[in-house]
Image (spheres, rainbow, N blue to C red):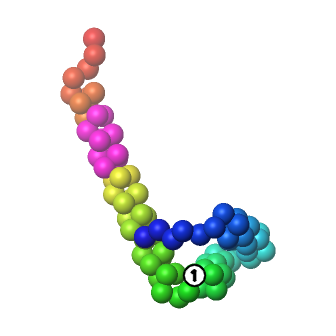
Amino acid sequence: MEYNLTKSTRKFIRSEKARIRRQFLDFKKQEELITELYKKILGSSKVEDIKEVKQEKAEVKEEIKKQEVKAENSKLKIKKVHPIK
């Protein structure tokens, strides 16, 4: 789900997130503050949509990594079975 924000709003969000990450070392505190930032700007329902999209992206990346590992393992097996002379 995409939200059309103005360039200045995106820049503000990016700078605020960077400030929060510099200021607070605790990851959970960072996430809470960033979520509050999005709630102020977008509203609470849209923030939940963003979280769902981020979770889906993370799951897709994890699946891709698993497939890459399987592909790499199969390549190693092929090399061991058929040595190049």
Characterize the magenta stretch by its predominant secondary structure: helix
User: As drawn, which residue projects farthest toward the left?
Assistant: 81
Position of the N terminus by quadrant: bottom left
Res. 35 in view: no
Which x, y percent locates residue 6? 63, 67
Q: Is residue 64 magenta?
A: no
Residue depicted at x 48% and y 75%: 50
Which x, y percent locates residue 8? 70, 66
Q: How crowded is mark 1: few (under 14 residues within 10 Å), some or many (20 or more)?
A: few
Q: Which of 62 and 37 is in front in this view?
A: 37
Residue depicted at x 26% and y 20%: 83
User: As drawn, which residue projects farthest toward the bottom?
Assistant: 44
Is 70 on the left-hand or right-hand side of 31?
Answer: left
- Which residue, given by chain and number where applicable, does mark 1 sit on? 42
Q: To which quarter of the image does residue 23 belong?
A: bottom right
The residue stretch that appears in magenta: 67-76
Residue depicted at x 27% and y 27%: 79
Q: In this view, does 78 lie above or below 72?
A: above
Q: In this view, does 65 lie above or below 24?
A: above
